[in-house]
Amino acid sequence: MAIKVASAPINWGIMEHVELPAEYPYSRVLNEIKTAGYSGTELGPYGFLPTDSAVLRKELAKRFLTLCSAFVDIELGNKAAQAGLTFVSRSAKLISEAGARLLVLSDKITPVRNATSGRRADANRVSWSEAEWKAAAAAIREVIALCKAVGLRVAFHHHVGSHVETPEEIDHLFSLFSADELGLCLDTGHYVYGGGDTIAFLEKQVSRVWCVHLKDVYDKQSAEARAQQMNFHAAVRHGVFAPLGQGSIDFAQVLSLLKRGEFDGWVVVEADVLPGGVGADAPLANAIAGRDYLHKLGV
């Protein structure tokens, strides 16, 4: 059993559904991920890294990097939006051909849910209806089948601003799938900002965790963002997510619980940033500091 450590383009402000910073082409981002000491990367938004799998493999190989996964978000509870499965299929094919064995699936952020980001009680009041949960479960099963056909497993990412954000929603989702069907991509920062206790979750359900996004949070900025009812993107720009080890999450305990649970997979060091927001001006320094921090914790 081994914990492997990756970074991701999101640390350079490369995020789905926002304008990408021109100063960070993929070649620079991959170079800096390698320079910072990581052995893997996520795909980032489709089209950021090369979409020709042979070219992608070559770009990764010359930097001795492994592609660990791809994050894909679609409107799972909306039957009319099931065209999103096409996006899943193209990402699954690409990452499978490039050597990855896991796809990270999330519900897409919607305006109604984004408006309640980080506020657990408010978010739970606008959860999916029973019909929407059924539509989401059906869509997830289709994603699982699509991925299985190309040799991928699926881990679900609970995401702030989406319909699977709070501990209650995560628990409901996992009541619908067996432990070998669907895993969790545990995002430590999103779980805490969504109202949960990461340590308590790992103590009970570490076996459901197939990959981890290691993300820290600042309590002060989080409280301010909630009080001002910021949506997810505003909260990111406000700086609720901290460089690893500088926020409130006990990562020594997180890693201890993962090891005790015989976790065998990738942990991806992340700090959500957006161009112009807090933390966007020093991605390489933050990436290096995050890797050094994990070395000190024995990973």
Image (spheres, grey):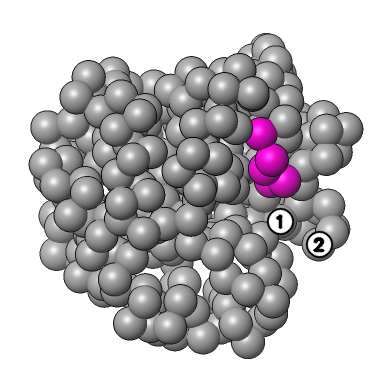
**Which element carries disc 1, helix, strand or loop?**
strand
Residue ranking furthest to the front? 62
Identity of the residue drawn at 29% across and 74% down: 293
Q: Say above or below: 299 vs 13.
A: below
Residue 222 in magenta? no
Q: Are marks 1 and 2 in contact (CB under 8 Å)?
A: yes
Q: Nearer the viewer, residue 29 or 21?
A: 29
Q: At 72% from the left edge and 34% from the top edge, which residue is drawn?
A: 96
Q: Which residue is mark 1?
A: 183
- Location of residue 128 (image quadrant): top right
Q: Is residue 264 left or right of residue 144?
A: left
State the residue position of label 2: 179
- Between 83 and 127, the residue placed more toward the observer is 83
- Give the crowd class for mark 1: few <14, some 14-19, many >=20 residues within 10 Å: many
Q: In the image, residue 295 lies at what x, y percent?
A: 36, 77
Report the magenta residues as a range: 98-102
* Residue 211 coordinates in the image, percent (x, y): 60, 59
Give the image location of residue 270, x and y in percent.
36, 53
Which residue shows up at 50% across the image and 31% down it?
59
